[in-house]
Image (spheres, rainbow, N blue to C red):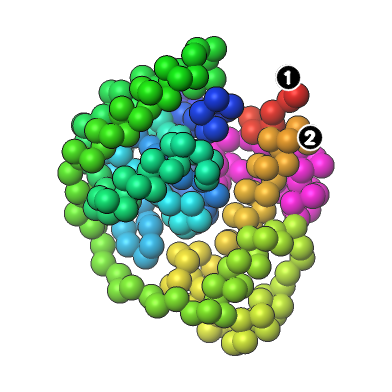
Amino acid sequence: MPAESAALVHDADMEADAFSFRLTSRAFAPHYHPAWVLGCVLDGARRFWVRGREYRAGAGDVVILRPGEVHACAPDAVGPFVWRGFHFRVGSAAADFLEKLTRAAPSLMPVCAGPAGLEELLAVHALMGVPSPAENKRSRLFAALGRLSQCGRKADAGHASHTPSEPALEALRSHLAAHAQDRVSLEDMALMARMGKFRLVRAFARLTGATPYRYLESARVNRAQELLAQGLPPAEAALESGFADQSHLSRAFRTRLGVTPGACRRRPR
């Protein structure tokens, strides 16, 4: 079995992507996704940083992240880390289900201890991308999601105080997400936020969990992923999303998604 492997499968019926990882030493830089993330840890352990706090996710645990929630992770155990995850598009039935579920049980986020629903989730994950009645896959998924409410809360591994939102920083964050393809310097960002560069970097990192540049690059990865899903070749998607070239895009994908840009490209049926 390879030391490391990564795969992505898109399922149009479920309006979701399924990720499969087997990792050893690879870490993921701070980034965010425009989708709901639901992941199952099969083996190994990782440290996750979410909302300024540190968590540990090990075998049997489930990780749930909201759209736009900046996170990062690194190895926390010797041996492989095995992950099966879903990215559910906002507006899909599964995303709406997770929204209601986590609103009713906020302690499920970001890391909860299984095994409630874990086997069912893995069974659905195995069906992603496989020709199968869509209603069957959906019903099995919702049954598994419903069981997540029985999962236990995981204690925080670290501590951090809550950072109040600042309108200027929120406006900058929205601008970066909406204009990822634009060339924006740190000086431009400081002017938008109406504060000095050094203060901006510190305040933005406290608010989001990433520096302005890392947040912008994550937004570019998300933009490129959208373009690839529309069928654009990686070289064109790189330029259209603000990257200097395809190699820059590939490096950014590896450190944030764990897969190559080619894995995200969907060719017309």
Q: Is residue 199 above or below residue 269?
A: below
Amino acid type at circle 1 is Arg
Q: Nearer the viewer, mark 1 or mark 2?
A: 1
Pick the residue in front: 239 or 16: 16
* Residue at the spot 82% in from the left edge and 42% down from the top edge: 236
Q: Is residue 252 left or right of residue 199?
A: right
Q: Earlier in the sequence, mark 1 or mark 2?
A: 2
Q: Quadrant of residue 191?
A: bottom right
* Residue at the spot 53% in from the left edge and 84% down from the top edge: 199
Q: Is residue 172 left or right of residue 150?
A: right
Please provide percent x and percent y for residue 229. Answer: 68, 35
Q: Is residue 256 left or right of residue 236?
A: left
- Total marks in image: 2
Please provide percent x and percent y for residue 177. Answer: 63, 60
Please provide percent x and percent y for residue 35. Answer: 51, 45
Residue 125 shows in this picture: no
- Residue 269: assigned label: 1
SS of the residue at dot 1?
A: loop
Q: Residues within 10 Å of mark 2 (few under 14, many from 20)?
A: some
Residue 164 shows in this picture: yes
Q: Quadrant of residue 45?
A: top left
* Residue at the spot 21% in from the left edge and 32% down from the top edge: 116
- Is 149 included in the stretch rendered in magenta? no
Please provide percent x and percent y for residue 118. Answer: 28, 29
- Residue 233: assigned label: 2
SS of the residue at dot 2?
A: loop
Instruction: Give the CA separation, mark 1 to mark 2.
Output: 16 Å
Magenta: main secondary structure equals helix
Quadrant of the snapshot with the C terminus = top right
Quadrant of the snapshot with the N terminus = top left
Instruction: Tell me the magenta residue range.
Output: 233-261
